[in-house]
Amino acid sequence: MNLTRTNQTKAAITAVGGYVPETILSNEDLEKMVDTNDAWITSRTGIKERRILKDKATSFLAIEAANDLILKHQVNPESIDLVLVATITPDMPVAATAAYVASSIGANNAFAYDLSAACSGFLYGMSTSAAYINSGRYKKVLLIGADKMSSIVDYTDRTTCIIFGDGAGAVLFEPSSNEHGWEDEYFRSNGNDRMSLRVKAGGSLHPTTRETVENQWHNIEQDGKTVFKYAVTEMAHATEQIIKRNDLKGEDISYLVPHQANKRIVDATAKRIGLKDDQVLMNIAYYGNTTAATIPLLLNDYKSKIKKGDKLIFAAFGGGFTWGAAYLSWAY
Ligand code: UT7
């Protein structure tokens, strides 16, 4: 079903910020840690290096990204109504990371909560933010995607440690002052395959015990081939649905803004909808897969290129499984 179109206010992204830590973990560094090599990682994933946060937590990444947005766009933090943090690596299992982030950036009039949907977290958070603005309930929603993936990666497992990195990005949603903004979304999930990409322990299914720690059940594990297959099929399908029902053609789309999990997954999606390379935003080579942070980090890296009225198609696939695509026209 298409997004219900009414005379409600349109939600627009009006500001963008981002942050990645300084420490670089390159493919050459990983060659010294596990049995892998730069050629394999580059050809199978498109990743050359990723950033690693030392000694600090996910909130640090989120605060840096939010402050970058606040400073560059001169946003008064006291005017923010809601702070949402999309993450699967909260500072602690209990105590919303978003609340700490909101207090730390001076968003003293905001309420705040975390949103967890793995690699689709930011995309789903965009839908939540847009809905609050569309309804007229709030005027300023700060959405942050932040993950310290290095905190749940086993650096002796070559099938996962080459993929993930740390980072954060932030966007501000406000009522649009023109005709541009959030246009449409197509989201799905399938919990039957949740074990294909998971952190097995630390929740209510397997509370932390000596055994769960010894068995490394607190690290991220995946059946890479299954995830890859689903991601290619579903990201492309969701994107096609959005394009068809909004009567868009390949040449109408300014940019595909895809979750950065694997360059081959993105290439397959872009090919299916007939996009050229210069219509696809990519930065996986420098950051790897930063989970909830990939999409806002793309917006931050390419913000000088994106112009008012540009038609952006977002797409993501992640643990759960969760996935979807969305259409937004850029408002500033
Ligand atoms: O955001 C959602 C989160 N995750 C994803 O989207 C990940 C989706 N999956 C993938 O991106 C890919 O499946 C991987 C990058 C994880 C793996 O790539 P692949 O092309 O599917 O490789 P594979 O698992 O089929 O493994 C091929 C070979 C195997 O060796 P054999 O059995 O053919 O001898 C692996 O043992 O490559 C081997 N291998 C490696 N070799 C060098 C696996 N990992 C590595 C490695 N370095 N790091």
Image (cartoon, rainbow, N blue to C red):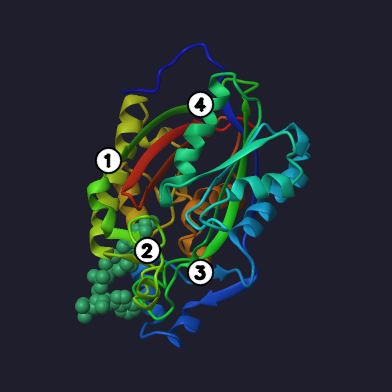
Decide if residue 48 is on the left or right side of residue 230: right
Q: Earlier in the sequence, mark 3 or mark 1?
A: 3
* Quarter that holds the N terminus: top left
- Give whichever of discs 4 and 1 has the lower sequence position: 4
Where is mark 3, residue-wise?
150
The Cα–Cα distance between marks 2 and 4, rounded to whole angstroms, is 33 Å
Mark 1, residue position: 237
Tell me the CA gap for discs 2 and 1.
32 Å
Measuring from the top left, give residue 35's x and y in whole percent.
36, 86
Q: Is residue 326 above or below residue 319?
A: above
Which is nearer the N-term, disc 2 or disc 1?
A: 2
Query: How many neighbours does mark 2 have within 10 angstroms: few (below 14), some (14-19), or many (20 or more)?
Result: some
CB atoms of marks 3 and 4 within 8 Å? no
Q: Residue at x 56, y 68 (%)?
A: 51
Which residue is identified by label 4? 131
Q: Tag 2's secondary structure?
A: loop
Q: Position of residue 76 (x, y in %)?
A: 78, 36
Residue at the disc numbered 2: 201
Sequence-first disc among 3 and 4: 4
Q: Is the C-beta of the residue carrying label 4 under 8 Å from the nearest atom of ligand 1?
A: no
CA separation, marks 3 and 4?
32 Å
**Residue 255 visible in image:** no
